[in-house]
């Protein structure tokens, strides 16, 4: 599947807000912030440096299922520290491939060593659907132009539908005189 577009174009359609948390914050604070901002992951930043990412999935697997307390566990204890990133010029196809291959749902976007945004698998899926819808609309328009052009070039014109057949008054539905006798 070839999906045109680059990550920068998708970022330009988003609000531009990047939600982050410090590595020494509690997991509870991280979950609160995710809920408040309606996001599934936060970047973990130490000053201007990206040091990790924490997601709802990290919380579920590394805190909740292990019986730990989110109010006593620090973000840096459960965050993913080997973070894959992308650039604004990267293709949507490449990011989809990377996210699928690494089983991740969020990719920080870095430009010149600075975090400028984050994209989710949902952002990419919306973009793919938009591209497919545009392609379908274009093809439908193209086909209707070809069908319209070919009918006129063949000397065909659109005419009104013919009226139903009319029978002479001498025949009625009950009249059997026109049938052959056996």
Image: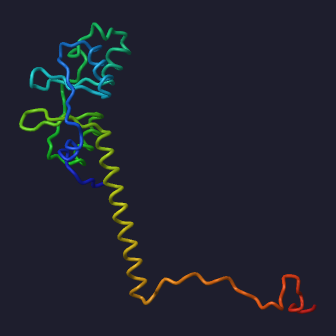
| Residue furthest front in the image | 169
Name the quadrant of the N terminus: bottom left
- Image coloring type: rainbow
Residue shown at 61%/84% (left/top)? 162
Residue shown at 22%/51% (left/top)? 5
| Residue furthest left in the image | 112
Front-most of residues 22 and 100: 22
Indicate the quadrant where residue 31 lies. top left
| Number of marks present in the image shown | 0
Name the quadrant of the C terminus: bottom right
Instruction: Give left or right: position of 162 versus 88.
Output: right
Residue 21 pos. (x, y %): 20, 20
The answer to whether residue 22 is above or below residue 178 is above
Residue 111 pos. (x, y %): 10, 38
Indicate the quadrant where residue 20 lies. top left
The answer to whether residue 102 is above or below residue 72 is below
Residue 78 pos. (x, y %): 25, 17
Instruction: Give left or right: position of 7 versus 135.
Output: left
Residue shown at 32%/28% (left/top)? 38
The answer to whether residue 182 is above or below residue 17 is below
The answer to whether residue 165 is above or below residue 2 is below
Front-most of residues 33 and 40: 33
Residue shown at 20%/30% (left/top)? 18
Instruction: Give left or right: position of 80 versus 35.
Output: left
Residue 126 pos. (x, y %): 33, 45
Front-most of residues 129 and 177: 177
């Amino acid at each position: 599947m070839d999906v045109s577009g680059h990550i920068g174009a998708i970022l330009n359609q988003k609000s531009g807000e990047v939600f982050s948390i410090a590595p020494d914050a509690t997991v509870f604070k991280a979950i609160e912030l995710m809920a408040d901002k309606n996001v599934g992951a936060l970047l973990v930043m130490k000053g201007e440096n990206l040091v990790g990412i924490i997601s709802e999935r990290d919380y579920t697997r590394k805190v909740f299922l292990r019986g730990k307390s989110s109010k006593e566990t620090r973000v840096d204890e459960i965050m993913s520290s080997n973070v894959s990133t992308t650039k604004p010029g990267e293709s949507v196809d490449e990011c989809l491939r990377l996210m699928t291959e690494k089983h991740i749902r969020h990719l920080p976007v870095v430009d010149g060593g600075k975090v400028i945004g984050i994209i989710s698998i949902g952002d990419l899926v919306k973009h793919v659907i938009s591209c497919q819808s545009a392609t379908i609309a274009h093809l439908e328009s193209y086909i209707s132009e070809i069908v319209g052009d070919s009918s006129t070039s063949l000397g065909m014109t659109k005419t009104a539908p013919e009226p139903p057949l009319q029978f002479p008054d001498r025949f009625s539905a009950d009249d059997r005189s026109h049938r052959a006798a056996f």
